[in-house]
Amino acid sequence: MELRNLITFIHVAELGSFTKAAEQLGYSQSTVSFQIKQLETELDCLLFERINHTITLTERGRDLVSYAHQVRVLTDEFKENLTVEEELSGHIHLVAPDSVCESMMNTHYMDFHKKCPSVSICATTGDSLLMLDMLDHNEADVIITLDRRIYNKDYIIAKEEMLPMHFVASSQCKFAGKKNLSVRDIVNEPFILTEYGQGYRRVLDRELAKMSLEITPVLEIGRTDIITSLLAESNMISYLPDFVTKDLITSGALCYLDVCDVKIDIWKQLIYHKNKWLSKSLKTFIDHVKKNEFSH
Amino acid sequence: MELRNLITFIHVAELGSFTKAAEQLGYSQSTVSFQIKQLETELDCLLFERINHTITLTERGRDLVSYAHQVRVLTDEFKENLTVEEELSGHIHLVAPDSVCESMMNTHYMDFHKKCPSVSICATTGDSLLMLDMLDHNEADVIITLDRRIYNKDYIIAKEEMLPMHFVASSQCKFAGKKNLSVRDIVNEPFILTEYGQGYRRVLDRELAKMSLEITPVLEIGRTDIITSLLAESNMISYLPDFVTKDLITSGALCYLDVCDVKIDIWKQLIYHKNKWLSKSLKTFIDHVKKNEFSH
DNA sequence: CTCCATCATCGAATTTTTCGATAGTAAATA
DNA sequence: TATTTACTATCGAAAAATTCGATGATGGAG
C-alpha cells in the first residue's frame, strides 16, 4: 500500500470518477484503474462498486478514505515542519582543551546563550587525539585543537590561527629580564607542563628531542589556570599559549622568558567532520566561536 | 515518499545499520542505501550522518522516525480492522412491490432485526422497471420482483419461485363455486387491479390482449391489502398472487374463481446486480429473505 | 441513432527498483 | 603488523513495476 496509490484513491473517492481523478493527477485513466485495482488486490477487498460505468464507494472504501486522509494529513504536516524555518534548538557537543574551555566560558559563552537560549551546549575537555577520535565517531560535533597544524581531507577547518606561545615564569624568577636565553639554560629547571596528551605539549617534547634535550616536569596538569597560579608563587617554568598567561603577564606576576632557540608553531583550529550535518544551531554556534574565540 | 521507504527507514533507524536492515527486510544493502537516499532527496535533507561507515540519525531523521511510526501504526490498524470479522452493521436498501413489503414486515422482518440489530433496512416499494433501474444505478442493494421470469447476465437471481395466482372475489360473488369459468365470462365485471407498473398486472394485460380481451379496472391501487378488503365487501374481482389472499381465502371471505383458459406464469425473484459487493450484512439479509420469504 | 462519457483490458514503452560486484575505509583479529 | 571482517557508496545490468495509448463495451444524452 504505497502512498501514491492512497493519494490517487483519495482523488477518485472525492471526484467519484477515475477519469476526473486521472486528469487532476496528470495520469492516464488506465493508470488510475490500475492503481485502484492494485489497492484492492493488496487489501483483498473491493473499494468501489462499478455498476454501469459509475463507481460507488463500498463500506471498505469509505473506511479507507478516512484512513488515507489521516495519512495524508500526517505527511503534509511533516513536510510542512521540514520547510518551516528550523528552530534554534537542540544539543551541541564541543570538545576543547581545558584552557580553551575556560577562556570561552569566561568570555563569550553567555553572549551565545543569550542569543540562542534553547540550544544546550555540552563542553567537555580532551586531548587532541581523543578529540579527533570523537570527530571520527561522531561523538563530538565540533572541536578546538591546540596542536600542530592539522590537515586531513575528512575534516573541515572552520577557522584557524597560529598561537603565540612563550616559556613563562614568575617575574621574580632568576631568568626574568634576561635576554637571549637558550633552552639549554632552562631545561633542567623545575617545569610544570600540561599533560602529555595536549598537542602543544607533545610538539614541545618533539622539538626538544630534535636538540637531544628533554624536560622532566615536576608536575603535569591539564588545568592551565592552576599552572599559572602555581608559577606566580614559585620558581617554576612552563610553556604556555599567551592567551592563558595574558592576565598575569599584564598584572606583572608572570613574565615571558626570552628563549631564542626554540620556535614552535602551534595552531588553534576549529574543526568539524566533513560529513557532519550542520544544523542551523550548529552553524550559528560555529560562527559565534569563529568570531569570538579567534583573533579577528 | 512511499511507504516502502518509510518502513525501510524505520528498520534502519532502529538497527542503526543499513546492512542489518537489509538482512531483516530481505533487501540487498545497496537497495537500502538507495531507498534512504531517495527519501533524503525527496525531503531535501540529510536523515543520517555517515561518518566512518557508521550512521547516526540527524535531527530531521529523528523527526522522521516519529512520523514514520505514526504512519505505520495507522497502516497496521487499518489492515487489522480489515481482517477483523466484519461487523454486522450498515445499511441495506431493499425495493419490492407493496404486497411483498407488507408480507415481509408482517412475518419475518422482526426475526432479522433481532438477529442483526445494527443493520438498518430501508424498504421502499416500486414497480419492476423502477426496481431494475435502481439496480442498474446502484440505488438499490437488492430487489424482489413479481413479474415475468427475468433473466439478464447483469443480474444475479438469488432465489426465485413461480407464484400461484388466481382470480379472486368475495365468496358471495355470483361466480363463487362455479366450475370451468372462462375469462370471457368475467372480463366485463368490475375489477380492482394493482397499478399498471406492477409486473404481474402487465403480464395479465398482455395475456388478455392475445385473446383480444381487455380489462378496464374500476380501481387501480398498489396496496394489495386494500384490494383484498375491498373485494371482501363488494362484487368486484381481482387477479392476485395467492400469498396476498391467503388469509381471506382461509377465513372464507374470499374465494378463487375457477378460470380455466388463462394460465399466467408469474415469478417472484430475489435479484441483485452481478457487480454488487455483498457485505456480510447484505449476505445475511439475502439469506434471510431466501429462507423466509420463499417457499422451501 | 449517433456521439460522448465512462471504466476495463491489453501490450508496449518507460521508469523505477533491485541486485551483484566492486571499492574504500575502519575496526577487530591473528 | 598483516589479515580478515564489517560497513557504506557507487555503478551498471537485470528485473520489476508503473504508465501510457489504443481499443472495447456499455449506457446516456441529444
Image (tube, coloured by chain):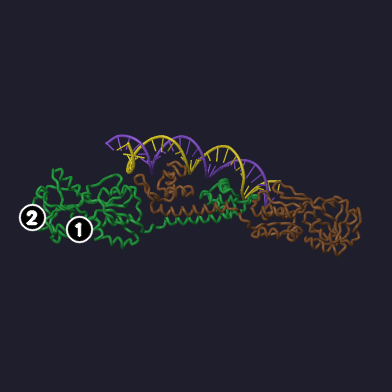
Chain colours: A green, B brown, C yellow, D purple
Which residue lies at the image location 79% right of the left edge and 52% below the top edge?
A: B163
| A174 or B185: nearer the viewer | A174
The dot on residue B123 is: none
Q: Using the image, determine if residue A242 lies above or below residue C30.
A: below
Within-10-Å neighbours for mark 2: few <14, some 14–19, many 20+: few
Tell me if residue A166 can be seen. no
Q: For mark 1, what is the residue?
A: A225
Q: What element carries label 2?
A: loop
Task: Mark 2 or mark 1: name the one nearer the start of the chain.
Answer: 2
Please provide percent x and percent y for residue B112. Answer: 69, 58
For this view, does A103 lie left or right of residue B167?
left
Q: Which amino acid does label 2 sit on?
A: Lys
Quarter residue A99 falls in:
bottom left
For this view, does B33 lie left or right of residue A94?
right
Please provide percent x and percent y for residue A232. Answer: 14, 59
Q: What residue type is labelled 1?
A: Asp
Chain to which the residue tagged by mark 1 belongs: A
Within-10-Å neighbours for mark 1: few <14, some 14–19, many 20+: some
Q: Using the image, determine if residue A144 lies above or below residue A106.
A: above
| B240 or B215: nearer the viewer | B240
